[in-house]
Image (cartoon, rainbow, N blue to C red):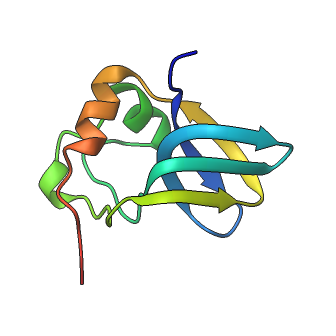
């Protein structure tokens, strides 16, 4: 079984991109997950999942965490290989 790289939008925790480990109802577990705190260069999460970002230096994606359990997932988007490479190439944002 190959990895399924996804973008998950939650009700109140924000948006994350990572490898889908499991899903049970609205509970989703991602590994190698980055919070997509702010993105530019894509009009929507749908475009980000298909095309990636055209402005990676303007995005704010913090460091990846090894594993995150997300509650109240309301949207899960499969990410294309091109978009995954784009998301993973965004420099780590830190304040």
Q: Splitting the image into 4 quarters, where does residue 81 fall?
A: top left
| Residue located 72% across and 52% down the image | 73
* Res 64 → quadrant: bottom left
Left or right: 81, with 20 as reference point = left
Q: Is residue 52 left or right of residue 25?
A: left
On the image, which quarter does residue 59 sit in? bottom left
Q: Quadrant of the N terminus?
A: top right
On screen, residue 68 versus residue 87, left or right, reads right
Residue, x 44% and y 43% (percent of image)?
44
Q: Residue furthest bottom?
A: 95
Where residue 43 sits in the image (x, y, percent)?
37, 42
Q: Nearer the viewer, residue 64 or 76?
A: 64
List the single residue furthest toward the left.
57
Q: From the viewer's perspective, is residue 7 above or below residue 36?
A: above
Instruction: From the top left corner, tell me how far across and down residue 79 is, in percent.
Output: 45, 28
The quarter of the picture where the C terminus appears is bottom left
- Outermost residue toward the right in this view: 25
Could you say which is closer to the camera, residue 28 or residue 52? 28
Percent position (x, y) of residue 57? 13, 56
């Amino acid at each position: 079984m190959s990895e399924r790289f996804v973008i998950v939008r939650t009700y109140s925790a924000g948006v994350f991109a990572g490898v889908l480990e499991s899903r049970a109802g609205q509970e989703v577990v991602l590994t190698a997950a980055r919070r997509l705190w702010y993105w530019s260069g894509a009009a929507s999460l749908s475009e980000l999942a298909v095309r990636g970002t055209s402005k990676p230096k303007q995005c704010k994606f913090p460091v990846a965490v090894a594993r995150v359990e997300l509650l109240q997932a309301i949207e899960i988007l499969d990410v294309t290989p091109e978009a995954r490479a784009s998301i993973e190439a965004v420099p780590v944002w830190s304040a």
